[in-house]
Image (cartoon, rainbow, N blue to C red):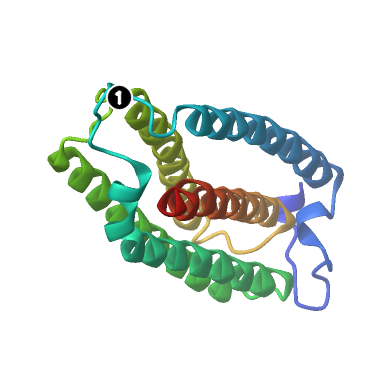
């Protein structure tokens, strides 16, 4: 089996994540999965745009009133998530160079940055709820919390996935078998980051502009 082969830097394949048929099949299957995820988020974005600022007559909350003050916080969240995407790239660079310690180190940094993003998002949601802008307040609030909250759930899943990978493979080291798993997790994390860029632009920036 592939995981039983003892690799060295000299025998390590150039693209370990697709070095065998299993890896190539996983790679293809995961892209199909991401296609389905894209459809999910596209529908949530469409719903948000249709229901933005919609609610009871005289509703006090609008995208401008809510997001103008909190935009610096959301910008910080964006920087954390984009930086975490970069650190996952560093992890994959070390994977291709057969440096397992580098993979684990940069994946750990990715997790720390992702946790920072998640804590700030929880703080943001809590702030809105204290203002009275909660899930059942209006059609606008429901569409907002569903879209951003679904992304938050994906962040939690991504963090759990990476942490479990790091713990489970801490003593196994690198093989084409484990490389496939790290690479797929990294792809998933990049997808989460791309979705957030759209959320930051469509929900927050366009919301502040009205």
Q: Residue at x 28, y 48 (%)?
A: 65
Foreground of the two, 71 or 38: 71
**Residue pointed to by mark 1:** 138
Tell me the quarter of the picture where residue 76 sits: bottom left
* Residue 158 in view (yes/no): yes
Neighbor class of circle 1 (other Cα within 10 Å; few <14, some 14-19, many 20+) is some
Q: Is residue 34 above or below residue 186?
A: above
Question: Residue 44, how many percent across, how many down?
Answer: 53, 30
Question: Residue 21, how many percent across, how many down?
Answer: 86, 43
Q: Is residue 15 above or below residue 66?
A: below
Question: Residue 50, how many percent across, how many down?
Answer: 51, 28
Question: Residue 148, how many percent across, how many down?
Answer: 42, 40
Foreground of the two, 91 or 192: 192
Tell me the quarter of the picture where residue 68 sits: bottom left
Q: Is residue 177 left or right of residue 129?
A: right
* Residue 163 in view (yes/no): no
Q: Is residue 155 left or right of residue 6?
A: left
Q: Residue at x 35, y 60 (%)?
A: 71
Foreground of the two, 172 or 198: 198
Q: Hey, which residue is sitting farthest front in the picture?
A: 58
Q: Residue at x 41, y 29 (%)?
A: 143
Q: Is residue 123 above or below residue 44?
A: below
Q: How many marks?
A: 1
Q: Is residue 138 above or below residue 114?
A: above
SS under mark 1? loop
Q: Is residue 39 left or right of residue 67?
A: right
Tell me the quarter of the picture where residue 119 sits: bottom left
Q: Residue at x 35, y 49 (%)?
A: 64
């Amino acid at each position: 089996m592939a995981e039983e082969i003892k690799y060295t830097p000299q025998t390590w394949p150039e693209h370990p994540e697709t070095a065998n048929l299993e890896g190539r099949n996983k790679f293809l299957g995961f892209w199909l999965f991401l296609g389905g995820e894209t459809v999910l988020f596209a529908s949530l974005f469409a719903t948000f745009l249709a229901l933005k600022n919609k609610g009871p007559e005289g509703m006090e909350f609008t995208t401008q009133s809510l997001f103008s003050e909190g935009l610096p916080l959301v910008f910080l969240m964006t920087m954390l998530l984009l930086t975490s995407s970069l650190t996952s790239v560093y992890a994959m660079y070390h994977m291709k160079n057969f440096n397992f310690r580098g993979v684990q180190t940069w994946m750990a940094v990715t997790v720390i940055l992702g946790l920072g993003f998640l804590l700030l998002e929880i703080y943001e949601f809590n702030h809105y709820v204290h203002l009275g802008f909660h899930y059942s307040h209006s059609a606008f609030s429901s569409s907002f919390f569903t879209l951003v909250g679904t992304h938050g759930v994906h962040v939690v899943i991504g963090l759990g996935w990476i942490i479990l990978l790091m713990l489970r493979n801490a003593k196994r080291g690198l093989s084409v078998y484990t490389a496939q798993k790290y690479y797929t997790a990294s792809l998933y994390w990049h997808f989460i980051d791309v979705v957030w860029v759209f959320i930051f632009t469509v929900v927050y920036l366009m919301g502040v502009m009205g």
